[in-house]
Image (cartoon, helix red, strand yellow):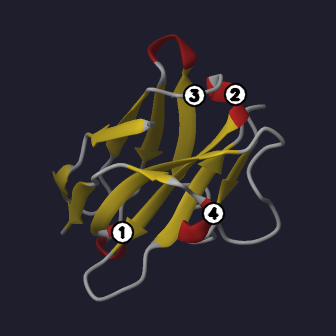
Amino acid sequence: HVQLVESGGGSVQAGGSLRLSCEVARLTYERFMYCMGWFHQAPGKEREGVATLSGDGSTTYADSVKGRFTISQDNAKNTVFLQMNALKPEDTAMYYCAADYAPIGCRVGRTPQPDDFAYWGQGTQVTVS
């Protein structure tokens, strides 16, 4: 089954940057047939969608991260990235990579929901102080 492995988390001061990576393996279909997403979950809070990336390259972002975060991919390395700039203390959370078979692309028009994704990584912690 699909394997997702996140890396790149850590501790950073407010205003700093981090780049998260998600290595994708064991896809049943071509990578462009999947919707990729990043979620975060702070202690005591629900898991929330941060960004999504469709196979055609289109992206969506949560309002809270627009203009600061960028989701991208390196097809040669089968890796999805989340570049996080101008980090704020409220960005502190566990960050999860997610994937779902979606040949027509990620759902649009609403905030991505955890139930939209079948495959999950173990998460990487981001702490902003």
To which residue does mark 2 refer? 32
User: Rounded to the nearest whole Å, what is the CA distance between mark 4 and mark 2?
Assistant: 17 Å
Considering only order in the chain, which callout, 4 or 3, is on the residue closer to the N terminus?
3
Q: Quick one: label 1, few (<14), some, or many (20+) residues within 10 Å?
A: many
Q: Quadrant of residue 92?
A: bottom left
- Residue 70 location (% of width, % of height): 55, 44
- The kind of residue on which mark 3 rests is Thr
Residue 91 badge: 1
- The kind of residue on which mark 1 rests is Asp
Residue 116 badge: 4
Q: Is there a contact, CB below 8 Å, between mark 1 and mark 4?
A: no
Q: Is there a contact, CB below 8 Å, between mark 3 and mark 2?
A: no
To which residue does mark 3 refer? 28
- The kind of residue on which mark 4 rests is Asp
Tag 2 secondary structure? helix
Please tell me whether mark 2 or mark 1 is closer to you in this view: 2
Please tell me whether mark 3 or mark 1 is closer to you in this view: 3
Considering only order in the chain, which callout, 2 or 4, is on the residue closer to the N terminus?
2
